[in-house]
Image (spheres, rainbow, N blue to C red):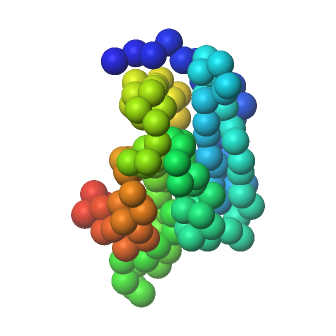
Amino acid sequence: MASGIDVASAAVDTFNDIKLSHKHRYVIYKRNADNTIIEVEQTADPSKTYDDFCAALPANECRYGIFDMEYSKSDADGIRQKIVFVVWAPDTAKIKDKMLTASSKDALKKQLIGISTEIQATDPSEIAYDYVLEKIQSISR
C-alpha cells in the first residue's frame, strides 16, 4: 500500500552515515506535519546505547528508527554489527498515525539499502534488547 509520502534526502544521507562510517548510533525518523515527507527527527552519537534509542521513541506516536547494533555471538567471534530498522507503532497511537506509518514504511525502507533486520513493534516488549538480539542472531546463522 503506497501512501505517496516522500523520503527527505537528508534521511537517506543520515542512514548512509551510519552504514558507512558509524557516525551515529541511531537515527529516528518521523513524518512532517503535512504527512508529505519522512524526515530525520533526531540522531545520536556513537556513545549512546540501545536503551537511549528505546527511550527516544514516543509513547503515543509512531516513528521509524535505525539502530547500529553491536553484539557478539561468542568471545571467539568478536564484535559484529547489524543495522536494525524499527517500525514503532505503539498501541496507544492514533489509528491514522498507525495507518500512515504502515503504508509509508516501504517508501523509506527502499531508500535505506543495507538494513539487516526489521522489527515491527507495538509495545516496549517488542523492542526489548534481548528480543531484538535474538532476532538478529537467528537471521545471522
* Residue 61 at least partly seen: yes
Rendered-image quadrant of the N terminus: top left
Above or below residue 64? Residue 49 is below
Q: Is residue 73 left or right of residue 27?
A: left
| Quarter occupied by residue 16 | top right
Q: At 43% from the left edge and 77% from the top edge, which residue is drawn?
A: 72
Q: At 71% from the left edge and 51% from the top edge, which residue is drawn?
A: 43
Q: Is residue 120 left or right of residue 42?
A: left
Viewer-proximal residue among 45 and 71: 45
Rendered-image quadrant of the C terminus: bottom left
Q: Position of residue 71 (x, y in %)?
A: 46, 73
Q: Is residue 71 left or right of residue 37?
A: left
Above or below residue 36? Residue 53 is below
Q: Position of residue 130 (x, y in %)?
A: 37, 73
* Residue 21 at least partly seen: no
Q: At 30% from the left edge and 62% from the top edge, which residue is drawn?
A: 135
Q: Position of residue 126 (x, y in %)?
A: 35, 60
Viewer-proximal residue among 99 and 114: 99
Q: At 59% from the left edge and 21% from the top edge, which residue is drawn?
A: 35
Q: How many marks?
A: 0
Q: Position of residue 33 (x, y in %)?
A: 67, 25
Work out which residue is located at the far top of the displayed protein and give it. 4
Work out which residue is located at the far bottom of the displayed protein and give it. 75
